[in-house]
Image: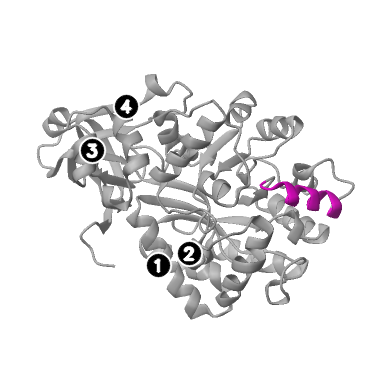
Amino acid sequence: MQLFRASIAHFPKQTTQFDNDIAIFKDGGLLVDNKEIKDIGPFSDIAERYPAATVTDFSGKWILPGLIDSHLHYPQTQSIAHYGEQLLSWLENYTFPTEMQFADSEHADTIAKVFLNQLLKNGTTTGFVFTTVHKSSSQALFSAASEIDMAIVAGKVCMDRNCPSALNDCPDTAQADSAELIETWHNKGRNRYALTPRFAPTSTEAQLAALGELAQQYPDVFIQTHLSENLDEIAWVKSLFPNADGYLDVYDSYNLVRERAVFGHGIHLTPNEWARLGDSGATVAFCPTSNLFLGSGLFDMTAARANKVHVAMATDVGAGTTFNMFKTYGDAYKVSQLRNEPISPLEGFYLMTQGAAVAHALDHEIGNLNPGSTADFIVVEPRFDDLTRLRIKEDAQFDDVFFALSILGDDRAIEQTWISGTCRYTKEDKE
């Protein structure tokens, strides 16, 4: 057994009372046995209960749950940080040409490893990931994640219109490939599958119906897509689906709005759509860096709260501008400031840990440091350079540490990333 000593913070349960329900141990102990968390509490108490445990001392650092990124695109690792587009032209000029390269399975294998290394380097231990239309791109990602026992939710992107012919698959192929990937990977190890229509404009009604059939056949698979990101996109959806009662209704008509459905963005939702999302148990992935970068709009966290909609933080790489979830909250804070409804540091931390895990019904495994959860955690060095040593006091409270890192931090704050009880990244490691 391993006993880790550090300052520790996590949310043990679902909450909206962030100040009251966060668990903080300034001199804490985290006991790990094999792949599982066995105990947590004051270090002196844990050390007394388990005198034979091997102690690793991270005093002065923080141990936090591994971070959860609820919406991102691994093929776009190589298209991040391109200049000057909004959503639809971004897809045409950058995303689609990049994704065509994934017809080459060796290329997919290479980028999958680069992508996962970027997640680990930034403290992310679970991602909800879009692959490409190529079945082999999903296989590459699941295989790479399996090698390090990493919890990944991913799915083959499905498109059968309004995309280049090289990325077009018919409804039957989308259904058959998705079903094969479900049978091969879903709930195998820590892999989970997500049915993944890219977004309504690139799927015909026949393709959405085919995916809806799979959603009914496999009720525990995830669903992920995009929703109401951009005003031109919404107008396009209206023209393509004239009989639908709005954008969300397109998905709802095909049994794709339910628990374990994750909708990226949700910036321009109607009151009825907010209410439906709340009733359905679905999740909206808040992608602030992407929304700002593409000029899409400002997410309405107040409406989400009022309708009891699950919200989870996400980078949306590659329109998102960073793999770092701390910095992603930093932009979420700025978005919320512009709406005069600031998201507190503790709520931001919740949305990338326990809040995301609860939204995805995975809080028995990830998002917290509870006994019985898988030992996915990160070691954070808040005072990693001259500026952070000046700004962050040695005895700073956790909310101040987290907020400062969301503005000043980057991957240099991540000392180690542990997955399933094994250290998979150390800052000194060479990439």
Lower sequence index among marks 4 and 1: 4
Sequence-first tag of 2 and 4: 4
Position in image of residue 238 (x %, y %): 83, 48
Q: Which mark is residue 3?
A: none
Residue type pointed to by label 2: Thr
Circle 4 SS class:
strand
What is the three-letter code of the residue carrying label 1? Val
Dot 2 crowding, Cα within 10 Å, few <14, some 14–19, many 20+: many
Give neighbour class at mark 4: few <14, some 14-19, many 20+ (Cα, 10 Å): some
Mark 2 against mark 3, which lies toward the viewer?
Answer: 2
Viewer-side label of 2, 4: 2
254 in the magenta segment: no
In the image shown, does 343 or 70 lie closer to the viewer?
Answer: 343
Q: Secondary structure at mark 1?
A: helix
Residue underneath mark 2: 77
Q: Nearer the viewer, residue 53 or 302?
A: 302
Contact, CB < 8 Å: mark 2 with mark 1?
yes
User: Which numbered marker is on residue 114?
Assistant: 1
Q: Pick whichever of labels 3 and 4 is earlier in the sequence.
A: 4
Amino acid type, callout 3: Leu
Span shown in magenta: 229-240
